[in-house]
């Protein structure tokens, strides 16, 4: 985080992670690697978790359930090749392998240079929050590559809001999720823009008084162009 008290932002962009900045899944080094002994069992267990157990996933995002408890619920047969905490540890390590939408990062960097704060606002899990905090504490790499773009992106953010620490999802109570940050930086919802892929999150943010742009991750180039146009309009009138 930039040093509070020394930075005065005139606006803030809250940007979502999954579906906007990145499309990569948890445990990607295993799910994308058919040679890993856990590939088949983990891929099927994760597919079932996210497709069929929405209430558990939401509790995980709210911080009511830990990643270790989720790993236990997956009931993956232990493999002697790996230590007992392998899947819990990889849940953090693999977040740092997630590839990031570089076109969108450039737009956010440009907005940041005009005095706009860029804050990650994500409905996400404790493992992701741990990964992003560790990345923000890392020294800059000499050369950023696709596999280290997570680190560069983490350092872009002026702050991070994650549902697992906020203990609530964005759409459930946007004032609870965002208001403390806005108030502490002498801003309000009319100074704020949310970039998110979910209609429900955008609607809730607008109802709270903010501006929201729904980002279509299926067409990244069109989405980036649309956001750039919306950003110009918002910057002029907010």
Image: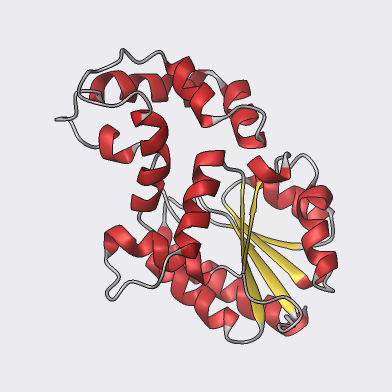
Q: Nearer the viewer, residue 33 or 184?
A: 184
In which image quadrant can residue 145 be found? bottom left
Residue 171: in sight, yes or no? yes
**How many discs mark residues in the rendered view?**
0
Q: As displayed, is residue 136 above or below residue 64?
A: below
Residue 101 drawn at (x, y percent): 40, 62
- Judged left or right of residue 112, residue 140 is left
Q: Nearer the viewer, residue 93 or 214?
A: 93
Placement of the N terminus among the 4 image quadrants? bottom right
Residue 75 drawn at (x, y percent): 40, 13
Q: Residue at x 39, y 40 (%)?
A: 25
Q: As displayed, is residue 163 above or below residue 86?
A: below
- Judged left or right of residue 83, residue 48 is right
Q: As displayed, is residue 158 above or below residue 75?
A: below
Residue 235 drawn at (x, y percent): 69, 81
- Judged left or right of residue 143, residue 36 is left
Residue 42 drawn at (x, y percent): 33, 23
Residue 216: in sight, yes or no? no
Q: Residue at x 67, y 44 (%)?
A: 165
Instruction: Describe the colour scheme in one phrase.
Output: secondary structure
Give the residue at the far left of this rendering.
35
Q: Nearer the viewer, residue 65 or 174?
A: 65
In which image quadrant can residue 189 be found? bottom right
- Judged left or right of residue 12, residue 51 is left
Q: Residue at x 34, y 20 (%)?
A: 44
Give the residue at the far front of this rendering.
83
In which image quadrant can residue 66 be found? top right
Placement of the C terminus among the 4 image quadrants? bottom right
């Amino acid at each position: 985080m930039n040093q509070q008290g020394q930075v005065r932002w005139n606006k803030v962009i809250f940007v979502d992670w999954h579906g906007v900045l990145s499309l990569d899944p948890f445990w990607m080094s295993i799910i994308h690697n058919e040679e890993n002994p856990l590939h088949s069992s983990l891929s099927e267990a994760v597919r079932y978790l996210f497709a069929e157990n929405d209430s558990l996933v939401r509790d995980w995002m709210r911080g009511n359930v830990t990643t270790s408890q989720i790993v236990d619920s997956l009931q993956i047969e232990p493999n002697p090749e790996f230590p007992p905490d392998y899947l819990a540890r990889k849940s953090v390590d693999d977040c740092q392998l997630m590839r990031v939408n570089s076109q969108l990062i450039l737009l956010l960097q440009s907005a940041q240079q005009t005095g706009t704060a860029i804050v990650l606002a994500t409905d996400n899990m404790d493992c992701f929050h741990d990964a992003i905090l560790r990345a923000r504490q890392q020294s800059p790499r000499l050369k950023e590559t696709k596999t280290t773009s997570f680190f560069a992106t983490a350092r872009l953010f002026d702050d991070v809001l994650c549902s697992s620490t906020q203990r609530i999802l964005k759409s459930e109570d946007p004032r609870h999720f965002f208001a403390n940050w806005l108030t502490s930086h002498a801003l309000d919802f009319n100074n704020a823009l949310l970039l998110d892929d979910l209609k429900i999150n955008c609607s809730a943010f607008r109802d709270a008084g903010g501006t929201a742009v729904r980002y279509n991750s299926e067409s990244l180039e069109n989405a980036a162009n649309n956001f750039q146009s919306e950003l110009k309009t918002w910057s002029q009138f907010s």
